[in-house]
Amino acid sequence: MWKALGALVAVMILLAGGALVFREALVNLWLKNHLAGKLAEILGADIRLDEVGWSNGILRAGNLRISGGELPFARCDAANINLPIEWKDLIDSNRPTLNIEAGSLELVWQTPRGQATTRADSTPTMNFSIARFSFRHAENPAWSLRDVPLQATHKDGTWDFAARGGTVIVSESPPLRLERASAKHTGHTLQIEEFAVSEPNGGSLTGQAKHNGGGWWTANFTWQNLDLASLPGWRWVDHFTGKTEGNATLENGVLRGQMIIRGAQTKAVPQLVKLAGLFAGENWNTMPWETLRFDFVRDTQGRVEFSNLEAISSRGLAVRGAGHYSPDNLGANVQLGVALAGRPWLRAFVPALFRNEEQGYLWTPVNVGGTPAAPTEDLTTRVVAALAMAPVEGAVETATDLPGAAVEAAGGLLRGLLGN
């Protein structure tokens, strides 16, 4: 009996020693056969694991894909994953906190379907450190994130995110740098508590946003020194440039705000070039605007309405009024003012062209219509008609407070326009 007991003890010692010696091989065999299924059970999703193994207290996986189930994303792809964990915790996952590192992770979001569920009772707290995080929406490609260093925590059914660095892609605009962002996700609600982005030329945009799943985003923004070319959908970079600042709110798909444009310039606007023909020696092919501000509203169909427009140029031009723009329609009712200083002979074109005098300007209404591809306006025909109707010779010659050379040049220019 004692020999038998001794032999049994010896066998047990050998088995225990063998288990220690071959522990990594045994754990890796279990990982290969059971880990994907256990993750699928915890997350309620489809799991694919490649190049998985455990060594020296570190669980590693070359690739991980999570998809399906009741998760709020269509797909999650991660690579180069490291998880410090003891081998016994792989089998009995009661560890209170998991610290997971990933070289890269791409998340493809989708609009949640059905009632969101959480598995806080079976999911431990998880801290993620991701070197390169990328994000896009499966149904809305208007914006995305690329190569963002991300810290994330999942606890009691809530995700917390913090990021600094990486790239933000918005529609057709140049890429923006993500300076910082923090967000929280619970159930169907994504709350972006803060974000800040910048462009290469020094402009910046900051704000907050919220999405409740299946509905509209709500948000508020503030921006400074942004190049107009950075704005989504800006199509007039060849004719209108400058730096913009302002603020806006987004609610139920409608964007409302105020904008100021610094250092604005218009280039090759035919109507201004034609109007400049009234003035001797002036070229309005490129027009600077020292003051340019307006309010705007953009609806869910892409129609933009602007109001309280105020624009003043050092060239003696001013514009005020309101209008609208959409992909298939264009319209505006504005007042165009020309400064009288140095141009007293312009009074000869009242009321043929200019209707009233106010604050040192002569004002004329301008009605714009048509489409962005084929705009219409009524200024050009009225300029030609005014030149034809006004007593050009008398108007110029009676402007006795103008130098004689300017009078002669203006008269010659007006005669040339009349001839054409």
Image: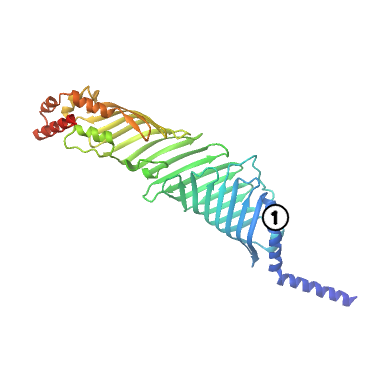
* Quadrant the N terminus occupies: bottom right
Q: Residue at x 67, y 47 (%)?
A: 119
Task: Specify whether residue 94 is in view.
Answer: no
Instruction: Please tell me whether residue 29 is drawn above or below residue 158 in the rendered image.
Output: below
Left or right relative to 261: residue 15: right
> Residue furthest toward the front?
420
> Residue furthest toward the right?
1
* Quadrant the C terminus occupies: top left
At label 1, counting other C-alpha atoms closer than 10 Å, the crowd grade (few under 14, some 14-19, many 20 or more) is some
Q: Nearer the viewer, residue 42 or 275?
A: 275
Q: Nearer the viewer, residue 383 or 345?
A: 383
Q: Residue at x 62, y 40 (%)?
A: 113
Amino acid type at image mark 1: Lys
Rendering coords of residue 337 (x, y %): 25, 29
- According to the image, label 1 marks what residue? 38
Residue 409, image quadrant: top left
